[in-house]
Amino acid sequence: MSEQPVAALQIHGALHDWYAVLHVSGEFGRDARLGSCLRDAMTALPIPDPPYLVLDLAGVASWDSWTIGAILSSVKRAMTGGGALVVAAAPADLLAHCRQTRLDRPLRFCETVESAVEQLRSGA
């Protein structure tokens, strides 16, 4: 049985009128630098002030505890700037873990990027 190759982490941003979307794909874990990678991606975008962000995890192949730390750090960064961050399309096992550990309270999750944008717009 051969092992599947690990998909390299990729983060790219898309700036919209009043918000930005960070699309994450590949292996989102096993690296203490994940928070730095997300921060660098956020910094590279001319994000509106206050920062309203959607973190799109639809392309994530795997995750670990470093992933959760990176997401929490990004949420804190957005909130400190007076904005908000919503996680979209999280893998089912990540979402279940966050619900089980009650991290779904400080984090906001939506099934799609579009519903995350609507949540940001409504301020819910």
Image (cartoon, rainbow, N blue to C red):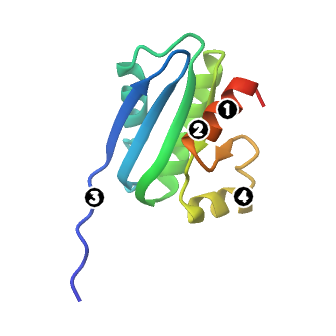
Q: How many marks?
A: 4
Task: Tell me if label 4 and label 1 are in contact, CB under 8 Å.
Answer: no
- In the image, residue 16 sits, relative to residue 75, either above or below, namely above
Tell me, for residue 99, which label it has, or none. Answer: 4
Tell me, for residue 50, which label it has, or none. Answer: none
Residue where numbered disc 1 is placed = 118
Residue in the image at 73% along x and 63% along y: 100
Give the amino acid at mark 2.
Glu
- In the image, residue 15 sits, relative to residue 5, either above or below, namely above
Give the amino acid at mark 3.
Ala
- Could you tell me how far apart the alpha carbons at marks 1 and 2 are, in whole angstroms? 6 Å
Q: Residues within 10 Å of mark 2 (few under 14, many from 20)?
A: few
Q: Position of residue 49 (x, y in %)?
A: 56, 10
Tell which residue pokes out farthest to the top in this image: 49
Task: Tell me if label 4 and label 2 are in contact, CB under 8 Å.
Answer: no
Q: Quadrant of the C terminus?
A: top right
Give the amino acid at mark 4.
Arg
Please name which of the two marks, 4 or 2, marks the residue nearer to the observer.
Answer: 2
Tell me, for residue 114, which label it has, or none. Answer: 2
Local secondary structure at mark 4:
helix
Residue in the image at 54% along x and 45% along y: 69
- Could you tell me how far apart the alpha carbons at marks 4 and 1 are, in whole angstroms? 22 Å
Which is more N-terminal, label 2 or label 3?
3
